[in-house]
Amino acid sequence: MASYDRAILHNPHDYEAWFNRGSVLERLQRYEEAIAS
């Protein structure tokens, strides 16, 4: 998760980092955060 956060911090338009971050949150059953991603 921290790696995706750093990637997004450096490039907020990196759609792959956003998508992967949301996927990780979904797997962790943190659905509200995943939707916000």
Image: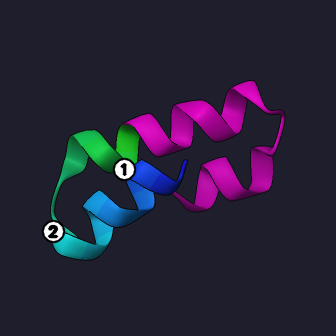
Question: Magenta segment, which residues?
Answer: 20-37
Please, what is the dominant secondary structure of the magenta stretch? Answer: helix
Q: Is residue 7 found left or right of 26 in the rendered image?
A: left
Residue, x 78% and y 44% (percent of image)? 31
Where does label 1 land, which residue?
A: 18
The disc labelled 1 sits on which kind of residue? Answer: Trp
Q: Residues within 10 Å of mark 2 (few under 14, many from 20)?
A: few
Q: Is residue 15 found left or right of 2 in the rendered image?
A: left
Whole-angstrom CA distance, mark 1 to mark 2, is 10 Å
Disc assigned to residue 31: none
Residue farthest along the top direction in this orientation: 27
Instruction: Describe the element under mark 1 as helix, strand or loop.
Output: helix
Residue, x 60% and y 33% (percent of image)? 24
The location of residue 34, given as percent across then percent down, is 64, 48
Q: Depth check: 17 or 6 in front?
A: 6
Q: Residues within 10 Å of mark 1 (few under 14, many from 20)?
A: some
The location of residue 8, given as percent across then percent down, is 30, 64
Residue, x 41% and y 50% (percent of image)? 3
Q: Is residue 21 found left or right of 32 in the rendered image?
A: left
Applied colour scheme? rainbow
Instruction: Describe the element under mark 2 as helix, strand or loop.
Output: loop
Residue, x 24% and y 39% (percent of image)? 16
Where does label 2 land, which residue?
A: 11
Position of residue 25 relative to residue 36, above or below, is above
Residue 28 lies in magenta, yes or no? yes
Discs 1, 2 touching: Cβ within 8 Å = no
Position of residue 22 relative to residue 36, above or below, is above
